[in-house]
Amino acid sequence: MTSTSPEDLRPPISGSTRLAAVVGSPVRHSLSPTLLNAAFGATGLDWTFTAFEVAEGDLPRALDGMRALGIVGLSVTMPHKAVAAGLADDLTEAAARLGAVNCLVPVDGRLTGHNTDGGGFLDGLAHDAGISVEGRTVVVIGAGGAARAVVEACGAAGAVDIAVVNRTSDRAGSAAELAGAVGRVVVPDRAATAIAEADLVVNATPVGMSGGPDGDMPVDPQDLRVGQVAIDLIYHPLETPWLVALRRQGIEAHGGLSMLLFQAARAFSLWTGVEAPVAAMETAVRAALAARPVA
């Protein structure tokens, strides 16, 4: 068994080893095995983590297999998150509101569906910037799955205003509703004003994934000011053009690695009941990302 952490304290795989996994399609580039095997190695738990390619439409059979084989934890990625929400026996409040599950936990023969993305974002924000969203104003750029999780989590955590900016107004409205009374839609033409007034600005679009100093940016960096915090949920590359430009202006800006890290840390703790070894997980995932070419 290949170790994904600096020191793997797990015993050799045996008939007692417990199995957790991620399902998705495509899944071969998933970082979940890196993150979770690093966590199991650092804690010495006799667990191991792998990835299963599960084609769209095959999740019901995969969950039958999970139950039959005694798999003790399952991460769920695209294209199965919405389907998993419909197949879980029980849902947390966040997973129910989002209609999406990224973590399944077996409890007394039943599968409980969680969504750890939003909580992972809040944990990452506290880790990177040392702040919470309570009492703050937030702008979220984008309305996809990651954006929806951020909007829902910020609304539940006490943000006082959450503006969603997206080219498609219907999708923006659907995302903003997840924040309840504090959610609202801002059309792109008026985004600059909302951004200038926000405490926290979050890019939840893929704009900037191509990297490079002259790459595309989700919004004009000049729309932001010193004193704000900006988060780009892209984690590969670690440094997007938008982050580089913002930091040159003296604006506090962080990438999306911490959201990836802490959503996995939450899954680890849900499955094992053990506090996640975040430092070991971060070391492993940074090494894995450093070895990947930027698209």
Image (tube, rainbow, N blue to C red):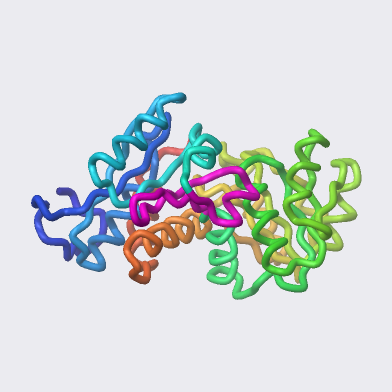
Say which quarter of the image contains residue 26: top left
Q: Between residues 18 and 242, which one lies in front from this camera angle?
A: 18
Q: Between residues 97 and 236, which one lies in front from this camera angle?
A: 97
Q: Is residue 96 left or right of residue 283?
A: right
Q: Between residues 173 and 124, which one lies in front from this camera angle?
A: 173
Position of 71 relative to 225 (above/below): above
The answer, for residue 290, to whether it is visible in the render is no
Q: Between residues 24 and 188, which one lies in front from this camera angle?
A: 24
Q: Write the residue at 59% across / 66% down.
A: 125
Q: x, y (%) of residue 197?
A: 86, 63
Position of 26 relative to 246 (above/below): above
Q: x, y (%) of residue 124?
A: 54, 64
Q: Is residue 174 left or right of residue 8?
A: right
Q: Write the residue at 33% across / 35% down.
A: 64
Q: Is residue 246 left or right of residue 125?
A: right
Q: Is residue 129 magenta?
A: no
Please report the bounds of the magenta region as a residue range: 90-115
The answer, for residue 271, to whether it is visible in the render is yes
Q: x, y (%) of residue 230?
A: 68, 60
Q: Is residue 114 magenta?
A: yes
Q: x, y (%) of residue 83?
A: 52, 35
Q: Write the residue at 44% across / 50% down.
A: 103
Q: Write the residue at 29% across / 51% down.
A: 72
Position of 253 relative to 15 (above/below): below
Q: Is residue 166 left or right of residue 290?
A: right
